[in-house]
Structures are given as C-alpha cells and as structure tokens.
Image (tube, grey):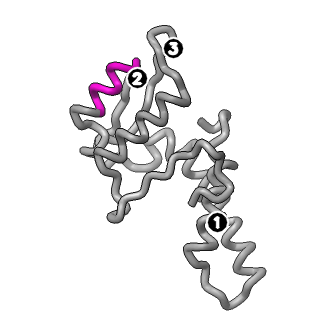
Amino acid sequence: MLNGAPEESLDVVYSSDWMTGDNFLKVIKHFVVHILPSNDYPVIVTMNNHESHISNSALEMFKQHYIHILTFPLPTPNQAQPSDRSVFAPLKASHSRFTDAWMLQYPGRHVTVCEMKTRVGTSFMRAATPLNI
C-alpha cells in the first residue's frame, strides 16, 4: 500500500486489520518526529475513541509531546468526523476513479490486492493535501 507514497511513510500492519495499541504508539512516534509538536507549537488531533487510541501509554505520549486530543465516541457517523469528510472522502473518490479506469482498460479482469496497492498510495497522496487536512 506504500507504492507511490513518500519515503517517510510508516508501514504499520496488523493481521486482523484492526488498529492495536502497540501500532498506535508507533503512529504517534512517527507523528511526533514529523510534526515536532512543542510547548510553543502544540497540536490538536481528532480521532475516534477506539481502545487502541486511549491507552495509558498513548495518553502519556500525547501529554509529553503537547498533543491535545479531541475524540469522537464510537460509533460517530462519517459525516460528523472531520477527517472522513476532508481526507477520506477524496481518497475514496480518487480510488474509485482509478478502479473505474483500470476496469475499462482490463475488461473482465478482477482488481487484485497488487493493483490496489498502487492505487491507494497514489490516491492517498492526492487526498491528503495540506488544504484538505
């Protein structure tokens, strides 16, 4: 899924497809390295309150690195979550356009995981723009 993504992208995968507390800590560390939050530059992160996001370790890391969190209770509809509207909706639209074009180019063939990897990486780069974020 990192085909077409920046070199610094984080590769965090878990066999169940669900986020885990350990992987979420890796994401926070990656975020801190690239965003550099500080007392003079605190940041706000919005997310749902999945158990992997609100562990004691995660909360302590947020506190140490001046990261303020705003959580949405589960289940909050996609329409009420800012990232779903601003980044993930354009990601889905871009991926759909790639998939439609691929299916026209290769009629009768099924889209496999291999084709999806490149599409998702490229689509994410088009959707996760500073303006959308």
Q: In which quarter of the image is residue 98?
A: bottom right
Disc assigned to residue 67: 2
Q: What span is in magenta?
A: 58-67
C-alpha distance separating marks 3 and 2: 9 Å
Three-letter code for the amino acid on which mark 3 is drawn: Tyr
The x, y position of residue 113, in whole percent, is 55, 73
| Type of amino acid under label 2 | Ile
Say which residue label 1 marks.
96
Residue type at mark 1 is Ser
Mark 1 or mark 3, which is nearer the start of the sequence?
A: 3
Q: Position of residue 123 (x, y in %)?
A: 66, 56
Name the residue tied to disc 3.
41
Res 47 quadrant in image: top left
Of mark 2 and mark 1, the one earlier in the sequence is 2
Q: On the image, which quarter does residue 44 sit in?
A: top left
Residue sitting at 47 percent across and 22 percent down?
A: 43
Q: Please report whichever mark, 3 or 2, sits nearer to the chain's N-terminal start.
A: 3
Q: Which callout, 2 or 1, points to the residue nearer the camera? A: 2
> Magenta includes 59?
yes
Q: Say what secondary structure mark 1 lies in.
A: helix
- Decide: is 2 above or below 100: above
Which residue does the image show at 34% across and 34% down from the upper left?
71
Nearer-the-camera pick, 114 or 85 = 114
Q: What element carries label 2?
A: strand
Q: Of circles 3 and 1, which is in front? A: 3
Q: In the image, is 107 to the left or to the right of 24?
A: right
